[in-house]
Image (spheres, grey):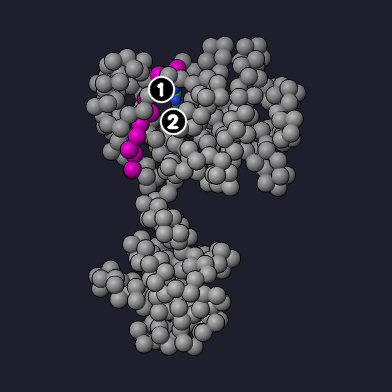
Amino acid sequence: MVKLAEWRGKEIFRRYGIPLPPGHVVRSADEAEAAARSGAIPLPCVVKAQVLAGGRGKGGAVRFANTPEEVRAAATAILGLEFKGEKVKELLLEGKLPIGRELYVSITLDRSRRLPVLITSGEGGVEIESVADDAIDRQPIDPFPGLAAYERRRAAKSLGLTGGPARALDGLLQSLWRAFQGEDAELVEINPLAIVGDGLVALDAKVIIEDDAAFRHPEYAEIRDDRTPLEEIAREKEIAFVQLDGNIGVIANGAGLTMATLDVLKEFGGNPGVFLDLGGTDDPKKVTEAFLLMAQAKPRAVFLNIFGGVTRCDTVAKGLVDAMAQVPAAERFPLVARIRGNNEKEGIEILRAAGITSIPDLKSSAQAVVAAAGGAP
Ligand code: ADP
Ligand code: MG
């Protein structure tokens, strides 16, 4: 999944002919002020943090400015923000448009129907999750004929549009559909789509590109602005490593056991902060490398839950003990191990020699690690 920042999504929209406000990306307050002074961006304008999380409007990460001085002040304030855990490094400056109603339009995949779906709502400008279900219209789209004229008319009707804005919507939906297909997107979302005069303008853009189509879009390989720096290193080393919000590190092998381990920790009040799927490996060095990466994420406690198969228990235990020896004493964290399966005895023995006890029972081991991380919140 490649989530694109708003300005990248808008670059795509522009290529497909979706109407947008005039915009300009900057990375410092100096650049922002200069863009306003030179006329590169019309005034009054909007200064928008380019982060992946939504709700920027409410969170002070979208501000309005009338003069170059105000643009500088807004840029300085927003560039200093850490918005929902992400440092703001880029800003999008946009002309401020005199907007009428704010609408919601998106195309995404309906996985249960196995079809794309067009979603529209007259209540745009707020997160769609907070809109009442009966204020949202959903139309599955047959991908082969594509988005049909009668479906576009129904969308216009659901949004209460007539005349100019209804005609504008017709063209816009065709462009949005072409963008969805052409870019192999998982989601193309415009929220809000604003009525401006007799037309429509996309004020926001959220685009997610489908991972399985990455080979068709090498242009997105360099973007990946949704990965954390540690996830980036992990990807280069081909380690399956994902950072979450919590404080417990999870090391397991195989996607199934890894997901189940996260669920079990949640069940006992724990909060997983990072997980690492060792997959199938018989190389202790690989385990050491993965574990050192986990240590850099600074978990409060780590849960090692391994079912030995191709990845033998002794391989994991050896890699782990080697890694622990490399972690400076001040940065060590409690470790709870549960290793079962192939070469279990040997593995347990290696851990025991290093002072780590393996708890065979899943429930007790999960509870032990939750307690070690400071208990349930
Ligand atoms: P988010 O979805 O993260 O809150 P948006 O890009 O949707 O951020 O902006 C939030 C609100 O700011 C919009 O609902 C709209 O009311 C206003 N806004 C955004 N861009 C413009 C613009 N170019 N002109 C006028 N108003 C804008
Ligand atoms: Mg929005």
Residue at which label 2 appears = 7
Amino acid type at mark 2: Trp
Report the side of 29 relative to 355 (left or right).
Answer: left
Task: Give me the disc on residue 23.
Answer: 1
Crowd tier of the residue under label 1, counting other residues whose Cα lies within 10 Å: few below 14, some 14–19, many 20 or above: some
- In magenta, the rendered stretch is 87-97
Amino acid type at mark 1: Gly
Marks 2 and 1 close (CB-CB < 8 Å): yes
Q: In this rendered view, identify the residue nearer to me: 317 or 109.
A: 317
Q: Can residue 123 be spotted in the picture?
A: no
The residue carrying mark 1 has its beta carbon less than 8 Å from ligand 1:
yes
Q: In the rendered image, which quarter contains the C terminus?
A: bottom left
Residue 111 percent coordinates (x, y): 67, 46
Report the side of 45 relative to 192 (left or right).
Answer: left
Residue visible at 53% across and 69% down in the picture:
280
Residue visible at 62% across and 11% down in the picture:
164
User: Which quadrant of the render holds ligand 1?
Assistant: top left
Crowd tier of the residue under label 2, counting other residues whose Cα lies within 10 Å: few below 14, some 14–19, many 20 or above: many
